[in-house]
Amino acid sequence: MKKQWWHDKVAYQIYPKSFYDSNGDGIGDLPGIISKLDYLKDLGVDIIWLSPIYKSPLADEGYDIADYYSIDPRFGTMEDMERLIQETKKRGMYILMDLVVNHCSDEHEWFQKAIQDPDGEYGNFFYIEDRKNDRTPCNWRSYFGGPVWEPLPGHPDKQYLHVFHKKQPDLNWENPKVRQEVYKNINWWLDKGLGGFRIDAIINIKKKLPFCNYPADREDGLSSIDHMLAEAKGVGEFLGEMAKETFHPHNAFTVGEVFNEKKEEIADFIGEGGYFSTMFDFAETVYGKSEKGWYDSKPYLTPEEYKSCIFSAQEKIGDIGMISNIIENHDEPRGVSHYILPEDLCDASKKLLAGVYFMLRGLPFIYQGQEIGMENTVFRSIQDVDDVSTLDEYRVALAAGLSEEEALKRVSVFSRDNARTPMQWNGSDHAGFTNGTPWLKENPNYRRINVEAQENDEGSVLSFYKALIALRKSEKYKDTAVYGKLVPFLEEEKNLIGFFREGERRLLVLANFQKEPREIAVPAESAEILLNNLDHVKIENGIIGLDAYQFIVGEVR
């Protein structure tokens, strides 16, 4: 694998609406982000990914873009954005924006022109079909529930395709004019000084045509869109063209949101000269999900299931390219609440989870608040929920026969709102996020879990993340932490996640993912402990004793 400028970096995702509010309107903004850049620099962050800040009606919280060339006034101005880019450059950091080009907003100029003349130039920017006898061209289910087809406003004889929200019409990537408009916008932003993009839902740009039905998999008579994606061929032609026209000439960093990739396609996606620099590993985030809906999905992964997911992903990627590792993002519940049982949730287990994913081979992404161990929030009623996906899954659970109380309980553990509650800066009102009323209720545990309480505490979760980043960036261990081969160790040992990172040096990572202590025989002449989530460790005659949820990194010889 050819070494790239971004390989040894650490990335951080900001959900701008919930990060820091500078003007008291209850919504996070760009000046708020600028004011926290030194915090991120001190943490050790190099790359900052911003969830969408474009002009948008926020039907899907900004992933419905009404103008790709404008900043939404809720978040600030274009001058604020330009200042953010300059301020990050001063600190040796890079800004990524979200690239959302499978769809736009129904309020975008293109769609409004398509409504005016469905048979004209802009009608072909979308998938618009005739509507006869209330029949739809296919029975695909949208990601947010219901059919993917919606009547075209003002045209009862027409319908348009939306695989997400009905206010997110899909762009027709088969139309070269659409692709050129997308590339023009990408280059416009890169010329402004962006470091690159996180690419949203990109596999969806290629549809299986002509439209056809698939066997219904729920009582609604619709079919999961995954069936279509499995049969769609040729997305690489679009992605290769996009990379050639935009990313590659700028040497931009790009990370793809890619699901359902086949092993033989990985080199095309992230190999040398691939479509993207890297892509996220979602193996553990999709594990245990049910086709029936969230109400039927596994609320927690066992340590063995988590271990199987991460090791399988590491083996699949191998030396083809550099994967990006996460435990949470804006679309997932809080990682510590998904991979750790509630009764075992504590600082030690949070640090263990952080250490395991951070020491994997790949680029670590931190989601805002993850570095202080933020947890899932508490929903008292469905009225507390903002997320469109959660609201749909609640309806699905009710239709399956669950009571309102049980339906809320089941969907709460997966709700995207868990990750979208305001960032917990301190123990003052509204967690120090705003002087006003936050757009989404803060997690009630903010007085206990916040940045201010952890900044000067050497034993805090925040301090442990800083130590992880320092180890990854240290001159002595950087090459091994970034490029070293990952070799599983005692893989058959239950509730133990152990592996070597072998490069210029040899690192051993051990995580005792259980309450019960254990002893591990280390196959080495000596071991120097470099990182430890507890204040003690027992080493005697080649035996390492690990207490409950103890995590260590050692150099072994």
Image (cartoon, rainbow, N blue to C red):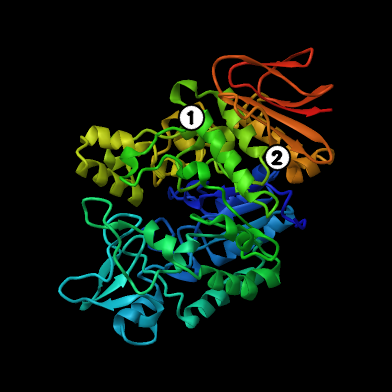
Determine whether 407 is above or below 515 in the image: below
Residue 116 figure quarter: bottom left
Residue 383 is labelled as none
Residue carrying label 1: 302
Q: Secondary structure at mark 1?
A: loop
| Position of 107 relative to 60 (above/below) | below
Q: Which image quadrant for residue 64?
A: bottom left
Q: Which residue is under mark 2?
A: 486
Amino acid type at circle 1 is Thr
Rendering coords of residue 145 (x, y %): 29, 55
Residue beneath the point at 42% across and 64% down:
231
| C-alpha gap between disc 2 and disc 1 | 22 Å
Disc 2 on helix, strand or loop?
A: strand
Taking the spot 61% from the left edge, 65% from the top edge, the residue there is 275
Q: Which amino acid type is shown beneath numbered disc 2?
A: Leu
From the viewer's perspective, tell me whether residue 117 is left or right of residue 452.
left
Q: Residue at position x 27%, y 63% from top? A: 139
